[in-house]
Image (cartoon, coloured by chain):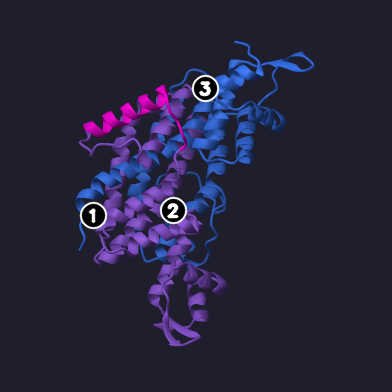
Chain colours: A blue, B purple
Amino acid sequence: MRMRMAELSAESGVPVATVKYYLREGLLPPGERTSPNQARYSAAHVQRLRLIKALTEVGGLSLASVGTVLSAIDGGDKTPHRTMGVVQDELAGTPPEVSGEAADWAFELLDGIARRHGWAELERKHVTVANVVAALATAKELGHEKLAERLEEYTDLALRVAELDVEVVMGLTSFDKMIEAGLIATVLGDRIFTGLRHLAQEQLSRKVLGRAP
Amino acid sequence: MRMRMAELSAESGVPVATVKYYLREGLLPPGERTSPNQARYSAAHVQRLRLIKALTEVGGLSLASVGTVLSAIDGGDKTPHRTMGVVQDELAGTPPEVSGEAADWAFELLDGIARRHGWAELERKHVTVANVVAALATAKELGHEKLAERLEEYTDLALRVAELDVEVVMGLTSFDKMIEAGLIATVLGDRIFTGLRHLAQEQLSRKVLGRAP
């Protein structure tokens, strides 16, 4: 399948002006030149445009983050593991600054769980670690340590979810598809699971938490 | 504990100018007037400021969303169930627009699961439903239906997480604390669980997905 710019736009649902912008920014690789002013695009271009759309519109990533993620996908030493890592970092954003006693307490708690599970040593500066620590420390400062008391159970469930994620990625036959699936399992997977959790909360809490005092 | 503006600021870690702005916007209730230009604030004001900080800095909510959430907390017919619902809606944001075959397919899939679980009927316009549908439909359009094939298993795990969430909220003795806990379990709970899932993904995928082809 080879197509002109107008067909590429129609097929992907991305406006021509936006496609041109992505080409200029290097988010979309150039098409095959057929004349100085004309190029032909392939099914891979359609897929790349859909991916950019998914990352921005559904994943909520900025175009700068999309660029970082796509470079990781296209890079030479790529593995699905590394792709997922880069995507995680971009999704995590800048962790809120939390320091002092509550933050130390939160890191110790998380680190203890990591040790019991035999995980690689946690680095406090790692964005994901910093995000979890900030949220736990904030909960404690607000006087809600209950959430933290159940952290071991939350971690067990998070591990089961991650096992499913890895199985989804492993179930693919092509290596490039696995790389892409690592990306999708992270970006769309977060959205889907958080949504399912909210729907489940709603069903459960309707019964037990729906009463006024 | 009664304190002046300067002490309130020091205690909560929120700058005086910001405290004044929150007072003007009605996010923080006024203090007790002691003279035309002076007021005294209480421990409840400190807690409210910490909550606003948690919602904006850790939860990533806009001040407009914080206002909506706080009105729900302060409202007359409040229950932890309703508070969680309002918070969920604010966190969900505006779902991306996805329509056509893939969206219909995604809704059918989710609706089938809800029916099997005996949940209240799902409304397609509900922001959380629309978010999950958009993410599933996008995965399908990208040729990654594997994620959707495991949706039943993801839902089972989401239910277990939601059970924990509800237990955390139920474990509190004061009704006002339960309302606040519903808020915190949702805003901070999402952050914590997503972070744990990413850490677990990293540990698991290092072994099985860390290899180049």
Label 1 to label 2: alpha-carbon separation: 29 Å
For this orientation, the residue located farthest to the top is A1
The residue labelled by disc 3 is A177
Mark 3: few/some/many CA within 10 Å (<14, 14-19, 20+):
some
Q: Looking at the image, do the residues carrying marks 2 and 3 touch, with CB atoms under 8 Å apart?
A: no
Would you say A68 lies left or right of A58 here? right
Mark 1: few/some/many CA within 10 Å (<14, 14-19, 20+):
many
Q: Residue A172: horizontal and vertical position, in percent? A: 46, 21
Q: Is the magenta stretch mostly helix, strand or loop?
A: helix
The residue labelled by disc 2 is A110
Label 2 lies in what chain?
Answer: A
Disc 2 marks which amino acid?
Leu
Disc 1 marks which amino acid?
Leu
Q: Of residues A108 and A155, which is closer to you in this image? A: A155
The lab-note entry on whether marks 2 and 3 share a chain reads yes
Would you say B13 lies left or right of A171 here? right
Q: What stretch is highlighted in magenta?
A: B96-116
Label 2 to label 3: alpha-carbon separation: 33 Å
Of the 4 image quadrants, the one containing the C terminus of chain A is bottom left
Give the SS element for disc 2.
helix
The residue labelled by disc 1 is A209
Disc 3 marks which amino acid?
Lys
Q: Nearer the viewer, mark 1 or mark 3?
A: 1
Vertical order, A131 against A65 (above or below): below
